[in-house]
Amino acid sequence: METMLDKSNTTPTTGVNTVHLGMVGFGTVGTGVYKVLERHPELVFEKIAVRDTQKARQVEGLNADLITADPFEVVRDASVQVVIEVMGGVDIAKNLITEALQNGKHVITANKELIAKHGAELLALANKKNVRLLFEGAVAGGIPIIMPLKLSLAANQVEVMAGILNGTTNYILTKMSQEGWDFETALKTAQEKGFAEADPTNDVDGFDAAYKIAILSSIAFNQSVNPEDVHCEGIRSITAEDIQTADKLGYVIKLIALAKKSADSNPDIRVHPMLVSKHHPLANVENEYNALWVLGDAVGDVMFYGKGAGELPTASAVCADILAVCRGLLKGNDPIPSMTFEYQGSTPLSSIENTTNRYYIQVNTADTPGVIGNLGQACGKHGVSLDSVMQQGTHADGNACIVLLTHEVTEGEMQAALKDIEAQPTTQSIGAMIRVL
Ligand SMILES: NC(=O)c1ccc[n+]([C@@H]2O[C@H](COP(=O)([O-])OP(=O)(O)OC[C@H]3O[C@@H](n4cnc5c(N)ncnc54)[C@H](OP(=O)(O)O)[C@@H]3O)[C@@H](O)[C@H]2O)c1
């Protein structure tokens, strides 16, 4: 029985034995959240908004009176203390969360695009209203990353973070590697198995991972990072041949979301395919699994690994945030002040030309004497020092496939060398340019 909650006042000052929830969205994640919270009779749903009120929901004993087609009813309901936004999209979700925070409600969301694009503004509003805006489910589904980065690693300067933050692309690259499939076949299988959307753009072109690394970098570096500034390349151009060649050299190819901060320059934050040594812990992250590898100045390297999406894994993260807030409310405390995010302004990012990398370059050339020397000269002219040069055989058309591995150089130097290589009369094409982690 409810004892001390005054429903007209969403901020109780003394302990209560019930917290009232509203949820916007009842799809994959919303269904998982509902199922997990069934174990918590002290948390009571007051309203749930969906697009189609007639659709059957995959839970038992749902009270149909809770369901509404108007998401604003949820954030305007005076009895609702905590709003769970698991609807997705940016514009309506932003308006809903803004209104919920204005109305003094705590908000939990799994919406990576919204938090990446508007997190700084929404977090500032939450702080002004002394309520919490939490988003553990927005990055890497069930893997606890946000709060460990903010709280457990707080004593560290984060030097590097490298993540496999998109399950769809990791599944595709794993299948290309293990089964020898081309990109299109692997994508089609991922779509049939439900790991890829009908429109896979956000995943395969790297935007989803860019939202996530922008969020993680904002927390690790305590400055808001605009996801549109994150240099982003997807995996469409990776071929089965690249994967096989990388394998022979002791590498796997992964879509890596990378963030590095140095004391004297802007943070280097980007998403693109990388060759990852088979000895690196990220190399063994396969299929739809996600991972984040963090190098902190005190702790050394740490890795977080698990399921980056799905009904119950994502609900695990969303419900952890819900429980953190609700436990505070049940005790009548200001909920979890340590979980407040306050960024110190925003930061520009290092341009891709200024980043330093090692490179894997695959060049298709005429199979004539002197070709390797010419490639070496073009690289040397621009300060690109070569670690190794290998001829990977001859194509059916008689051309040779030559693979160069460079030492660390700037992207600008590498691009200048590639222009010279492309202009050589013996060069047929540059088959691939992949950075090495
Ligand atoms: N799926 C995952 O594994 C995962 C992992 C991490 C984060 N996320 C994030 O979690 C959020 C939800 O993802 P999801 O996969 O659960 O999406 P989903 O399955 O498509 O569910 C979306 C829900 O929102 C409802 N909805 C959509 N537009 C609405 C509107 N205008 N008014 C009211 N309700 C509306 C839909 O109603 P109907 O059911 O009536 O169509 C549906 O219940 C997204 O931000 C996503 O990026 C998802």
Image (cartoon, grey):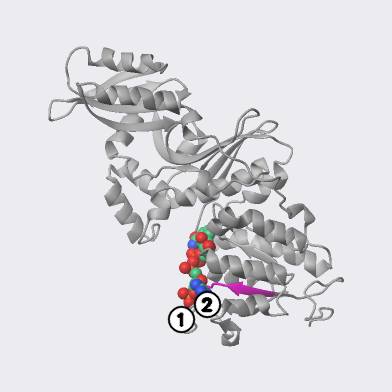
Residue 232 at x, y percent in the picture: 45, 43
Kindly indicate the quadrant of the structure image that contains residue 419: top left
The region drawn magenta spans 21-27
* Secondary element at image label 1: loop
Q: Secondary structure at mark 2?
A: loop
Q: Is mark 2 within 8 Å of ligand 1?
A: yes
In this rendering, the answer to whether 369 lies above or below 299 is above
> Residue at 71% across / 69% down in the picture?
102
Residue 73 image position (x, y, % from top left):
62, 80
Asked which quadrant contains residue 78, the reply is bottom right
The three-letter code of the residue at mark 1 reads Lys
Q: Which residue position is annotated with label 1?
A: 55
Q: Is residue 32 visible?
A: no
State the separation of the CA atoms marked 1 and 2.
9 Å
Residue 229 part of the magenta segment: no
Image position of 117 (left or right of 221): left
**x, y (%) of residue 246?**
35, 31
View extreme (right): residue:
14
Amino acid type of the residue that numbered disc 2 sits on in the rendered structure = Val
Visible residue check, residue 276: yes
Tell me where residue 118 appears, x and y as whole percent. 60, 57
Q: Residue furthest bottom?
A: 65
Label 2 sits on residue = 50
Residue sitting nearer the eye, 30 or 85: 85
Q: Nearer the viewer, mark 1 or mark 2?
A: 2
223 to the left or right of 278: right
Give 429 or 300, whichever is nearer the viewer.
Answer: 429
Contact between marks 1 and 2 (CB within 8 A): the answer is yes
Disc 1 C-beta below 8 A from ligand 1? yes
Residue drawn at (46%, 50%), measured in percent from left and top?
Answer: 207
